Structures are given as structure tokens and as C-alpha cells.
Image (cartoon, rainbow, N blue to C red):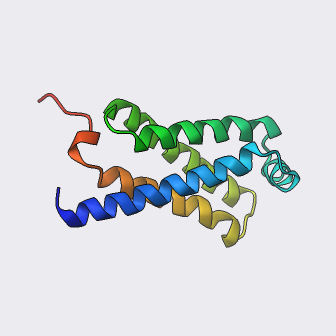
């Protein structure tokens, strides 16, 4: 892995971890504004607790060394959660300020996954 790719990976991964952790904390904090926001998208309030827990677990999985299969599942979960959030905001008529965080986290997920080091990938048996 080149030094450039390693830098890209760590910048994207740390921003992804920060974004997922901060949004998870907001979702787990039971703030009225967040509850109203989720209800406005048509989701039950308990759904944000589930997503918040999964985000925290996903961040841990992506950051700890080893466990490449677990990392693949975490990246897949981040991809599905953020693409679902993006599409939910669009379907609910969300403005750019509502859709941008989901889009940014989706892009960071893709960049982090693409540039991950070899020891964080599943080895193929060809």
C-alpha cells in the first residue's frame, strides 16, 4: 500500500468514525428535535436507538485491527444505513442541508472501504 493510499484511508476512516459516532450519540440521547426529525421521516422513535447502537458497533469493528469479515459487514451496514438515510431524506422532500450528512457519510464509507489496507480485507481463495 502506498503512503498516499494509507493517508487517504486513515483520513476517510477517522472522519467516518467521527461522523458515525457523533450521529449515534445524537440518536441515542433521546433529544426531542431528533425524535421529531425521525418521526418526520416516518420512522418510529425506537428505530434511532437501534441504528445508534449499530453505528457504535460498526465504528468499533472498522477501527480495531484484524477481523476482516466483521469489517466487511460493518462497511455494508454503513452503506445500507447511509444510502437508506439519503433516500429517506429525498423521499420526504428533504433539503440539501438534510441530505448532505448522509451523502457525506456514504462517500466516506466508500472511500474508507476502497482504500483499506490488505490486512483489513478478506483474502480471496482463487
Q: What residue do we see at 20% from left, 64% from top? A: 3
In the drawing, does residue 93 fall left or right of residue 112? right
Res. 44 in view = no
Where does the image place residue 19, in percent across and percent down from the top left?
57, 57
Q: What residue do we see at 68% from left, 71% from top? A: 97
Where does the image place residue 7, in percent across and percent down from the top left?
30, 64
In the drawing, does residue 49 fall left or right of residue 72? right
Q: Quadrant of the N terminus?
A: bottom left
Q: Quadrant of the C terminus?
A: top left
Quarter occupied by residue 64:
top left
Which of these two is toward me, 57 or 34? 57
Above or below 54: residue 95: below
Residue at the front extreme, as displayed:
64
In the drawing, does residue 3 fall left or right of residue 61? left
Above or below 105: residue 124: above
Q: How many marks?
A: 0
In the drawing, does residue 126 fall left or right of residue 21? left
Where does the image place residue 72, in percent across and percent down from the top left?
38, 37
Res. 35 in view = yes
Q: What residue do we see at 35% from left, 31% from top? A: 69
Residue at the bottom extreme, as displayed:
96
Amino acid at each position: 500500500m502506498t503512503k498516499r493510499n494509507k493517508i487517504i484511508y486513515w483520513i476517510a476512516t477517522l472522519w467516518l468514525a467521527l461522523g458515525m459516532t457523533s450521529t449515534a450519540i445524537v440518536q441515542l440521547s433521546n433529544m426531542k428535535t431528533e425524535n421529531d426529525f425521525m418521526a418526520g421521516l416516518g420512522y418510529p422513535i425506537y428505530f434511532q436507538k437501534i441504528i445508534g447502537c449499530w453505528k457504535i458497533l460498526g465504528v468499533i469493528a472498522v477501527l480495531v485491527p484484524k477481523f476482516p469479515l466483521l469489517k466487511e459487514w460493518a462497511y455494508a451496514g454503513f452503506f445500507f444505513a447511509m444510502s437508506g438515510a439519503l433516500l429517506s431524506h429525498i423521499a420526504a422532500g428533504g433539503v440539501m442541508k438534510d441530505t448532505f450528512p448522509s451523502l457525506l457519510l456514504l462517500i466516506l464509507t466508500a472511500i474508507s472501504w476502497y482504500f483499506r489496507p490488505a490486512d483489513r480485507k478478506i483474502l480471496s481463495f482463487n
